[in-house]
Image: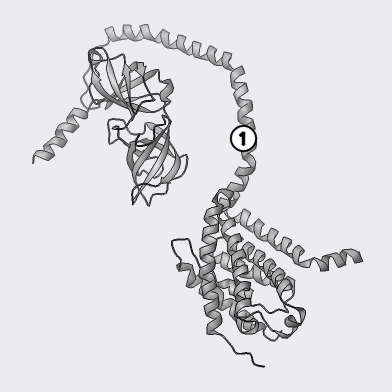
């Protein structure tokens, strides 16, 4: 609860980076980084489900407003929030959820974080590209974009975690 | 009521997911034209087909009326013929050099036609005596047919559009970008041709009309066909566009030979550029 300002700041910073920097980056429209999903990745464990959905939805809507694709990123973020809730309930024990503040790399370890972020980013990008293309015949194209973009985004997410890596305080 | 509350709190992740998913999907559908259009299309395609089937049956039942109206029109047109003949003898001819028509048309009947060869030719029952000259364009009520190749006193052969040497300057009706229409080179379907040399940056829509450009033998704006496939792999900076031909080459009966009255003058002027 006391860390709400930090999350708000992270929200604004990631949205800013996404809209003004990463929007102009990409590899032939095939691989596009969406670093803003980091915000949803590192929401604290204790966040109630409704707040995870709401935060993800708001984040998606903010990005949509600047990308002129109202609803698209919001939808992908909603799908991702669902994946996050399921993934955490399957892999993290209740005690860990009580002791660790948030699912960052410094708290949960490199391997867990890599699998966790890869799964969630993949789900997000798949939903995003599928609903952007919006027809089944474009499935192969969407899958290729998803895979390449996932690698790109994952690289940036892991990089950002290394930059802000903190040794466990205890 | 209590059970309902337990149910909701137990499955809150799924229920919330459905709620947020529906909200964002609703936003997506109602605010983005592409998604909206494709949603409506996919749901209406089936209905459209059913309408078309019913229409086919209706058309068949209406054949009698259509025949009657055509017969009536024929009668009306036949009645006009003697009048024009008598008029011609009474009116004195005036040569108007200023407002000369650029194009005049000669009707001809197709007497031989092929569509299944690699290079197809058409023979018509008009020739030198009727004013047909080599290199004139030939059209059909539906679209472009070909170019006159050889002329005898009473017949002429046409190099069909379905010929690997035929190139016709064509434009896209909306963007006015032009390219050349070719047939052959691996595509030997009489229904389709390829529009080449349209620059890559032009946005081409499906079912866009392709018409003659006016840079060739044909008057500008004669339909050629419509775009069915855009951006086939080909050159580096040019699109190759697949065009469904408007002319039904399998069922050609009457064609019009286009006589460009100002062509000789244009040629003369253009050739004077080269000598300098």
Q: Position of residue A113 (x, y in %)?
A: 62, 77
Whether residue A125 sits left or right of residue B82 in the image: it is right
Q: Chain of mark 1?
A: B
Q: Locate residue B153: give its quadrant.
A: top left
Q: Residue at x 77, y 63 (%)?
A: B15
Q: Nearer the viewer, residue B168 or A5?
A: B168
Whether residue A83 sits left or right of residue B122 in the image: it is right
Q: Residue at x 57, y 55 (%)?
A: B32
Q: Residue at x 64, y 92 (%)?
A: A169
Q: Locate residue B17: give its quadrant.
A: bottom right
Q: Position of residue B55 (x, y in %)?
A: 61, 26
Residue at mark 1:
B48
Q: Farthest residue in the front direction? A: A111
Q: Locate residue B240: give its quadrant.
A: top left
As drawn, B176 above or below A19: above
As drawn, B182 above or below B63: below
> The N terminus of chain B is located in which quarter?
bottom right
Q: Position of residue A25 (x, y in %)?
A: 45, 68
């Amino acid at each position: 609860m006391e860390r709400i300002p930090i999350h708000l700041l992270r929200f604004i910073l990631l949205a800013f980076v996404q809209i003004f920097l990463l929007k102009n980056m990409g590899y032939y429209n095939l691989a596009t980084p969406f670093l803003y999903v980091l915000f949803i990745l590192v929401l604290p464990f204790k966040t109630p489900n409704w707040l995870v959905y709401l935060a993800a939805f708001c984040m998606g809507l903010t990005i949509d407003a600047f990308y002129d694709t109202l609803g698209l990123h919001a939808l992908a973020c909603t799908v991702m929030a669902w994946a996050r809730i399921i993934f955490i309930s399957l892999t993290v024990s209740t005690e860990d959820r009580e002791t660790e503040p948030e699912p960052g790399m410094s708290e949960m370890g490199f391997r867990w974080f890599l699998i966790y972020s890869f799964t969630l980013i993949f789900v997000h990008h798949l939903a995003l590209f599928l609903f952007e293309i919006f027809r089944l015949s474009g499935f192969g194209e969407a899958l290729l974009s998803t895979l390449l973009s996932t690698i790109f985004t994952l690289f940036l997410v892991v990089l950002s975690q290394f930059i802000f890596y903190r040794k466990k305080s205890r | 009521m209590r059970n309902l509350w337990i149910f909701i709190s137990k499955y809150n992740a799924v229920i919330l997911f459905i709620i947020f998913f529906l909200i964002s999907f609703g936003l997506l559908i109602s605010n983005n034209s592409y998604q909206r259009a494709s949603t409506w299309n996919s749901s209406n395609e089936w209905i459209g087909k059913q309408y078309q089937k019913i229409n086919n049956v209706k058309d068949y039942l209406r054949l009698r009326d259509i025949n009657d109206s055509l017969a009536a029109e024929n009668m009306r047109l036949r009645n006009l013929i003697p009048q024009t003949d008598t008029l011609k003898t009474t009116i004195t001819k005036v040569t108007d050099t200023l407002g000369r028509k650029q194009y005049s048309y000669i009707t001809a009947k197709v007497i031989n036609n092929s569509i299944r060869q690699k290079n197809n030719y058409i023979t018509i029952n008009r020739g030198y005596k009727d004013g047909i000259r080599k290199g004139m364009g030939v059209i059909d009520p539906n679209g472009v047919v070909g170019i006159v190749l050889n002329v005898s006193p009473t017949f002429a052969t046409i190099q069909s559009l379905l010929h690997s040497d035929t190139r016709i300057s064509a434009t896209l009706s909306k963007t006015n970008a032009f390219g050349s229409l070719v047939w052959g080179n691996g595509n030997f379907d009489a229904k389709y041709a390829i529009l080449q040399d349209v620059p890559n940056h032009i946005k081409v829509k499906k079912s866009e009309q392709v018409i003659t450009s006016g840079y060739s033998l044909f008057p500008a704006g004669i339909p050629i066909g419509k775009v069915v496939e855009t951006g086939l792999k080909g050159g580096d900076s040019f699109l190759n566009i697949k065009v469904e031909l408007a002319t039904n080459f399998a069922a050609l009966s009457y064609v019009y030979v286009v006589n460009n009255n100002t062509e000789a003058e244009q040629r003369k002027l253009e050739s004077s550029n080269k000598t300098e």
